[in-house]
Image (cartoon, coloured by chain):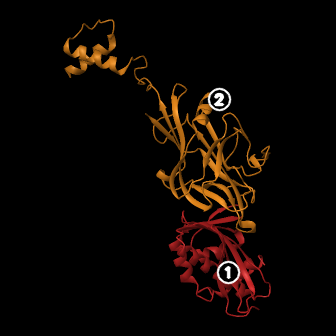
Amino acid sequence: MWNEPLTATTRQIDDYTIVVTARAADGIECAAVTCVYNAGAGFGIFGEMRVLDDTGAPRQRLRALVLLTREALRFAADNGITRVHTEAPARLEQFAAAMCGIAPDSAGDRRTFAGELHAVRTHALRVSDATGALIGMTTKEERALDAAIDVLS
Amino acid sequence: MPQSTFFPEGLQLIDGVSQTYAPAWSVDVGGVYAGGAKSALRRGLARFNVFGVASDGRALTIADTLTDARLLVDVIGVAGAMGWSASVERISRADWDYTAANWNIYKTASNWTAAGGDVATPPPAAGFASPAALGATTIDGLLPFVTDAIANRAGAVLLRIKADNETPGSTQFFSIRATQTFDTRLRLRVTYAARDPAPIDRPHAGSMRADRAAASARTSSPTPASSPTQPHAQGSRTQSSNI
């Protein structure tokens, strides 16, 4: 189990790439995601989230991923991004849809989510809180998400 | 000069990372380094028929003299650096099936000779710089492709769009809208200089100017119905004026 609270921070890799990392209170890196963007064009791509430490409880893992999403969207909003895009594997469709509030386009094993940042971020802030907890999610839904996220670890 | 605009008969993106992923909702070009399964190497494929129905203007004919051809695109995504080199090439598989193809196959159960799409010359590849912003822009220099399609391929313009450097080491990517509204869909616009075809109800008619001159002469100085130059037209117009 990770030490609480979990927090997410952004590290700039180059002019077009960031890594958002969720850390436990003792500094352990719990999860991370690479995002690429172009501020001039106002466009960003949310990359693959990875759970980096396998000692987290299932619901902590879910909260870590929520924090990654919220922090990436904050960075996007602060840097002039207006459109965001991500492609999720089918098993993470439910999580991605819950976080961004968009019905995906579906092809093969991928689900594409694309939309205006303001709409996506508004939805993400509405359905989650600053600790990474998803608001209003039933236990059954939460377990389903936990199961999907475990695959990444 | 007159222009004709054509929507694609079919298009898709193909992906060198997720090689069975080949949707048709956008035409993506370049590479994305976003971790594991989220990384991508994309090429765009599109097919137009310039002898087919035009969305604006008319179908082209072999008699047309073409002066310009370009893709009109709506860029919906740019990630990474801008202005990198990309190329448009001619797909050499005339039976490429955009409903079944992906990185490995060009139609069901038939592999591309080289994964990622077979291309050939002529015409030579047309280079362009990747777009720097979202919104409407053009990819120019496609006149040789349309000329070749009219002369040799029954009007079929088959295009593959790819980055020149597909292993840049960092994200270089753009995405073109392939669906949505009329004004923003990918389309091919051809400018040409050509005499309009003769009206379908007067296939042997001369020029419009000669017709107007003859009509004017008839109005000011009626000629006998047996005039050898306009035997049928004269009779019908006289009848019409009486009504």
Disc on res. A65: 1
Q: Residue at x 51, y 27 (%)?
A: B64
Measuring from the top left, give residue B32's x and y in whole percent. 69, 62
Q: Residue at x 21, y 16 (%)?
A: B219
Residue B136 visible: yes
Indicate the chain on which mark 2 is placed. Answer: B
Residue at the front extreme, as displayed: A14
Q: How many marks?
A: 2
Disc on res. B82: none
Measuring from the top left, give residue A150's x and y in whole percent. 76, 80
Q: Residue at x 53, y 28 (%)?
A: B61
Q: Which chain is orange?
A: B
- Give the quarter of the figure containing the N terminus of chain B: top left
The crowd level at tag 1 (other Cα within 10 Å; few <14, some 14-19, many 20+) is many
- Give the quarter of the figure containing the C terminus of chain B: top left
The crowd level at tag 2 (other Cα within 10 Å; few <14, some 14-19, many 20+) is few
Where disc 1 sits, the SS reads helix
Q: Nearer the viewer, residue B49 or B141?
A: B141
Left or right: residue A65 compared with residue B111:
left
Left or right: residue A45 compared with residue A40:
right
Where disc 2 sits, the SS reads helix
Q: Colour of chain A?
A: red
Disc on res. B152: 2
The quadrant in which residue B158 appears is: top right
Measuring from the top left, give residue B98's x and y in whole percent. 67, 47
Q: Are marks 1 and 2 on the same chain?
A: no
Q: Residue at x 57, y 45 (%)?
A: B8
Q: Amino acid at mark 2?
A: Asn
